[in-house]
Amino acid sequence: MLDGMHRLVYTGVRKEEEAMQCEIARQFFDMLTALSAQQRLPREYSAGQTLYQAELLLLEKIDAYPEANASALSARCGVTKGAVTQMSGRRVEKGLAAAYRCGANKKEKYLRLTSEGRRALAEYTRQNEAAAAELRRYLCSLSAGEKRTILAFIAKMKDCMPVCA
């Protein structure tokens, strides 16, 4: 009788653990899906200006490398020169960037952020810094053992990541 009760309790704990493991994996992949979807949606960072993640990356690079032409920006952003030309044209139309020519080469266009572009980039930076600070606060509250467990979990999930088409 006692042996049967032990088996029942063990089975119940085992099923609860299995359910928790499935829930952890489900939530992890839900998070990846949400992140991927969020990357494809524009967000408002300045009055009426909605920007995609790739456009924000371009604004960051324009700000950081004002002497860079479209070829240099494409290399820094990891996209084609055509994509940079297209995105930068839209940013100029929206008043976030301004094109200018410099030096002896009058064919080459360069970009600089406008005040509206700097405002949008500053808001994006502020939001990212606030999110990073919140995450740092949470991670600082964890024990070293909990942090090692999280790192091991992330490493294992990378190893076991299903191939998605």
Image (tube, rainbow, N blue to C red):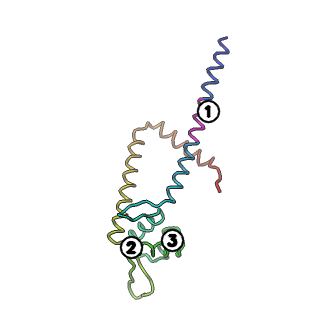
In x, y percent, where is residue 72? 48, 74
Examine the image and state in which quarter residue 139 appears: top left
Label 2 sits on residue: 97
Say which element carries label 1. Answer: helix
In x, y percent, where is residue 73? 47, 72
* 162 displayed left or right of 86: right
Q: Residue at x 45, y 76 (%)?
A: 89
Say which element carries label 2. Answer: strand
**Upstream in sequence: badge 2 or badge 3:** 3
**Which of the two residues, 129 or 48, is positioned nearer the viewer here?**
48
Gap in Å between the C-alphas at discs 1 and 3? 46 Å
Note whether 106 is above or below 47 in the view shown: below
Which marked residue is nearer to the observer: mark 1 or mark 3? 1
In x, y percent, where is residue 50? 42, 63
Contact (Cβ within 8 Å) of mark 1 with mark 2:
no
Contact (Cβ within 8 Å) of mark 2 with mark 3:
no
Q: Given the image, on which type of amino acid does mark 3 rest?
A: Ala
Label 1 sits on residue: 18
Does the magenta segment cover residue 20? yes
**Upstream in sequence: badge 1 or badge 3:** 1
Note whether 100 is above or below 44 in the view shown: below
Label 3 sits on residue: 75
Tell me the quadrant of the picture where the N terminus can be found.
Answer: top right
Q: Residue at x 38, y 76 (%)?
A: 98
**Residue range corresponding to the magenta coloring:** 16-25
**Upstream in sequence: badge 1 or badge 2:** 1
Crowding at mark 3 (Cα within 10 Å: few <14, some 14-19, many 20+): few
